[in-house]
Amino acid sequence: MSSKTLDVVLVRHGETEWSRTGRHTGRTDIALTELGRRQADQLAGMLAGRTFELAMSSPLIRARETYERAGISTDAEINSDLLEWDYGVYEGVSTPETQLEIPDWSVWTHPIIGGEAVDAVGDRADSVIGRVAEANGDVVLFAHGHFLRILAARWLGLPAEAGRHLALNTATVSTLGFERESHVIRRWNEGCHLRGIEATP
């Protein structure tokens, strides 16, 4: 298969307690909720019939369990470049809580004390895109909300910060691809019908 026709399928993990309540969840290895596990099971229907030359997953349990429950036949490579943004001192804290002290604060626009700059996350996304470029068939990635938004922005040749414009819910499937020579988004943020009360950070 030509590299100009392959699909790159992005799967955000199912619900966790922290995603449900809008807390920034970077490197904390938090498991799926019961709803999150049922969401991951339903992803199998959305991905049914798809074959992938390459599957990769973040090492964190919420991504790995989503992969395991989604019914992908390809063994997943565990790739630390797919880890979520390291939020430093903002780990486990919601945006509204931080804005009580810094009214205009956003993870996208302010320094991440003790964590990663947005461009550093973009560099990791570029590394994943480089790995994807080696594939000769469709690719599926199981990872995290902010990371996948940044990866999509970098796929389009945009700065990492442009990921702020690409909202992404838990337990969703998105597809990147090509239109002739251009990198494009084919589908975005398509999810199963099971929903929690998610507040995206």
Image: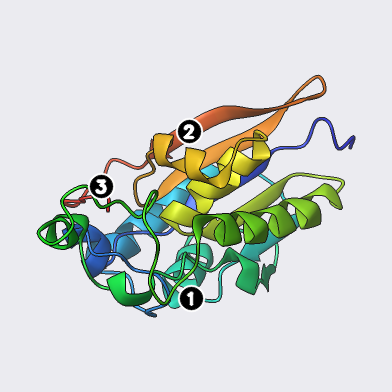
Residue at the limit of the structure toward the left, as seen here: 100
- Amino acid type, residue under disc 2 in the picture: Trp
According to the picture, the residue beneath numbered tag 1 turns out to be 60
Instruction: Please tell me whether mark 3 sits on a helix, a strand or a loop.
Output: loop
* Quarter placement of the N terminus: top right
Q: Earlier in the sequence, mark 1 or mark 2?
A: 1
**Local crowd size for mark 3, using a 10 Å CA cut-off: few (<14), some (14–19), many (≥20):** some
Q: In screen coordinates, is 76 left or right of 67?
A: right
Q: Earlier in the sequence, mark 3 or mark 1?
A: 1
Q: Which mark is residue 194?
A: 3
Q: Give 71 or 2, whichever is nearer the viewer.
A: 2
Between the C-alphas of marks 1 and 2, the distance is 23 Å
Residue furthest to the top: 180
* Cα separation between marks 3 and 1: 22 Å
User: What residue lies at 55% left-to-right and 76% top-to-bottom?
Assistant: 59
Residue 108's x, y, as percent? 39, 49
Kindly identify the residue that appears in the image at 59 percent across and 27 percent down. Answer: 186
Query: Helix or strand or loop: what does disc 2 sit on?
Result: strand
Amino acid at the residue labelled 3: Leu
User: Where in the figure is residue 144, as x and y percent of width and height?
Assistant: 46, 59
Q: In the image, is residue 86 above or below residue 158? A: below
Q: Is residue 73 visible?
A: no
**What is the three-letter code of the residue carrying label 1?**
Leu
Quadrant of the rendered image containing residue 76? bottom right
Residue at the disc numbered 2: 188
**At 80% from the left edge and 30% from the top edge, which residue is drawn?**
5
Q: Residue 48, located in which quarter of the rendered image?
A: top right
- Residue 172 x %, y %: 42, 45
